[in-house]
Image: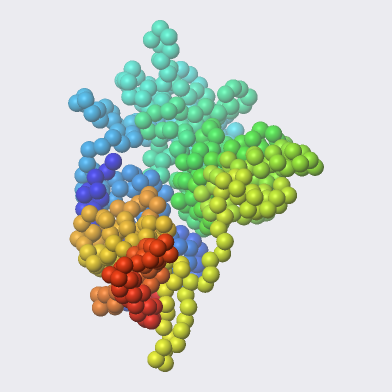
């Protein structure tokens, strides 16, 4: 865990305008800065950066966050990597905690050699060897690759022979070479190179550093592909081949294609389809999907159309369900059984391949078709089994709207109502809520009364994000934990030292919590117009009254129930009349339109 105090200091030291301006050209617009969004294609700027709040928000695609969020989204880094990157740029030393790839030892042992530097030297060696390997060069040319594309991906060659990298690392017996996955120790103490007589594909992390290799045989032979083993730098289930090179193209295309082989990625890039990545000889993992969703809103999994390809596709669907969002999409492209992306694009060209990508099947369609194929839809038993098979999958879907749509489709296919399907799958479906805002004329102007949809809670949150000291005046009776906005309000009020925290630090405190989506959405709305203290105080008071009007004093219900059971005493009756009068007075109030509603 990174200490909260360190993250607060980091966000207070980093200026988000300076950070974003290194990558995006910003233009002053009033108190804020604007630009065309770096996360989606647009012609008119909708990306806003607030120097006072140290927060950015795109009103086009909804991207938003603080400095840490920007580094994560723009560079595709994980959380710890993003914090580390920001800390280094700010001249801050990361606190002591266990990090992936650390070479230090917590028990006081001296630090070992830098594995990143070892991998960099190995990559240079393999690239140099390619220049003097005619057979390897001929193989790449036969696959249609140019020198430019080979250089872009750092392709090299591991020569035949058992101990070639000894020429680069004279201390061939060093433990670090094994830790890096470059050598194998056989029985009897004999050591030899892991990669021999193979085309070498460097695997890069998000920062462009070499963390592993994939080696392909030149001709026939097994294994066809040989990957680096798990090392302190490299974990197959977390990494994707070609992501570092494809990041810009992914953003421009608005999608990413996931294929199965290194040569598929390289061949597609050779045909100017540069937004493809590959898994590393392992099945798709949830971390893969999360990493790609940081780059784009659409993932297209491309598999062979045979049984193995469909099994791989179904696994990709299953691991995608828990990380889906309603503004994200997953699709599936099945190539003819005799083709892979490499062979198809070489035979048919870029336009034909991209047409297949456009026609890829949405996750929902593949989901339903696959489940229907597993049962006999002509029988009651088969349709019942369809609901049974769908239940665990539906419950895993993180996107609420998609979950509801698929529940409806499963109900229809099973011949039951949506409510029945909801009960059988234990998924609640919510009836539409009536319009939340009513307009009523009063003294010649429109007034707004906040009702039903918890808009008053959102107004309170806006006030607290704009002026945190107001949290001291939030009365306990307006905090309702039965809905998301109420829980977010309660969490915000309960945050230690809230009145001394900046906007960006407050949001960082809730990263990964259930309150993050609510708070970030409201913070984004605040960028449109500043809420000064006078306006905030008025909105604050009116929102509290609106909540109390919507949720009358529970003492009224208590007294009503007592009266129905046997009557009230005279003091209780007087209390009841007073509470009713107070509540009626509240209902007569109309909430003036907020400047940020």
Asked whether residue 255 appears in the rendered view, the answer is no
Residue 561, compared with residue 185, is above or below; it is below
Q: Quadrant of the N terminus?
A: top left
Question: Where does residue 49 sit, x and y in percent of width and height?
Answer: 35, 66
2 to the left or right of 132:
left
Residue lying at 46% horizontally and 41% vertically, measured from the top left: 287
Q: Is residue 38 left or right of residue 87?
A: right
| Residue 392 rendering spot, x and y as whole percentages | 58, 40
Who's the residue at 54% across and 44% down the image? 396
- The residue furthest right is 378
Provide residue 299's location: percent of width, then percent of height: 56, 49
Which residue sits at x=54%, y=47%?
Answer: 397
Position of 287 compared to 51: left or right? Answer: right
- Picture layout, residue 81 above or below residue 550: above
Q: Is residue 231 visible?
A: yes
Residue 460 appears left or right of 423: left
Report which quarter residue 177 is drawn in: top left
Task: Please tell me which residue is depicted at 42% across the width and 92% down the height of the picture.
Answer: 444
The front one of 382 and 185 is: 382
Please determine whether, in this image, residue 449 is positioned above or below residue 491.
below
């Amino acid at each position: 865990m990174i200490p909260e105090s360190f993250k607060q200091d980091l966000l207070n030291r980093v200026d988000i305008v300076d950070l974003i301006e290194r990558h995006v050209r910003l233009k002053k617009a009033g108190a804020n800065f604007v630009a065309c969004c770096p996360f989606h294609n647009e012609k008119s700027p909708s990306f806003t950066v607030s120097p006072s709040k140290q927060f950015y928000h795109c009103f086009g695609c909804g991207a938003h966050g603080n400095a840490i969020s920007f580094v994560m989204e723009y560079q595709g880094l994980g959380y710890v990597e993003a914090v580390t990157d920001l800390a280094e740029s700010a001249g801050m030393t990361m606190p002591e905690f266990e990090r992936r790839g650390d070479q230090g030892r917590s028990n006081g042992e001296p630090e070992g050699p830098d594995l990143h530097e070892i991998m960099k030297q190995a990559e240079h060696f393999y690239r140099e060897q390619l220049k003097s390997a005619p057979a390897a060069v001929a193989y790449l040319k036969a696959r249609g690759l140019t020198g430019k594309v080979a250089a872009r991906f750092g392709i090299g060659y591991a020569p035949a022979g058992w101990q070639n990298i000894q020429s680069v690392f004279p201390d061939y017996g060093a433990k670090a070479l094994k830790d890096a996955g470059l050598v194998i120790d056989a029985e009897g103490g004999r050591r030899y190179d892991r990669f021999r007589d193979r085309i070498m594909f460097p695997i890069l992390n998000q920062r462009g550093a070499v963390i592993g290799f994939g080696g392909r045989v030149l001709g026939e032979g097994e294994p066809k592909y040989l990957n680096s083993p798990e090392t302190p730098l490299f974990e197959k289930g977390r990494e994707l081949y070609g992501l570092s090179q494809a990041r810009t193209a992914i953003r421009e295309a608005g999608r990413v294609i996931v294929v199965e082989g290194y040569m598929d990625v390289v061949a597609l890039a050779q045909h100017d389809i540069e937004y493809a990545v590959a898994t590393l000889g392992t099945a798709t993992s949830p971390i893969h999907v999360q990493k790609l969703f940081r780059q784009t809103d659409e993932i297209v999994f491309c598999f062979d159309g045979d049984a193995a390809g469909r099994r791989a596709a179904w696994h990709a669907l299953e691991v995608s369900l828990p990380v889906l969002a309603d503004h994200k999409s997953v699709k599936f492209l099945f190539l003819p059984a005799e083709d892979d992306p490499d062979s198809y694009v070489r035979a048919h060209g870029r336009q034909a391949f991209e047409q297949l990508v456009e026609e890829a099947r949405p996750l929902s369609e593949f989901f339903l078709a696959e489940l229907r194929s597993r049962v006999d839809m002509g029988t009651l038993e088969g349709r019942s089994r369809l609901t049974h098979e769908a239940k665990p999958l539906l419950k895993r879907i993180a996107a609420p709207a998609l979950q509801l749509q698929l529940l409806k489709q499963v109900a229809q296919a099973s011949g039951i109502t949506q409510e029945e399907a909801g009960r059988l799958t234990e998924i609640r479906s919510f009836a539409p809520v009536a319009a939340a805002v009513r307009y009523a004329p009063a003294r010649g102007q429109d007034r707004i009364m906040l009702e039903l949809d918890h808009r008053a809670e959102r107004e309170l949150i806006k006030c607290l994000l704009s002026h945190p000291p107001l949290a001291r005046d939030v009365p306990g009776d307006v905090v309702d934990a039965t809905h998301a906005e109420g829980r977010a309000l309660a969490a915000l009020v309960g945050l230690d030292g809230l009145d001394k925290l900046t906007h960006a630090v407050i949001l960082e405190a809730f990263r990964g919590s259930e309150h993050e989506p609510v708070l970030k959405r409201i913070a984004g709305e605040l960028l449109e117009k500043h809420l000064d203290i006078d306006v905030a105080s008025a909105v604050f008071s009116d929102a509290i009254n609106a909540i109390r009007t919507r949720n009358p004093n529970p003492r009224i219900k208590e007294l009503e129930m007592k009266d129905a059971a046997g009557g009230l005493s005279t003091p209780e009756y007087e209390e009841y009349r007073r509470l009713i009068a107070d509540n009626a007075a509240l209902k007569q109030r109309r909430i003036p339109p907020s400047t940020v509603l």
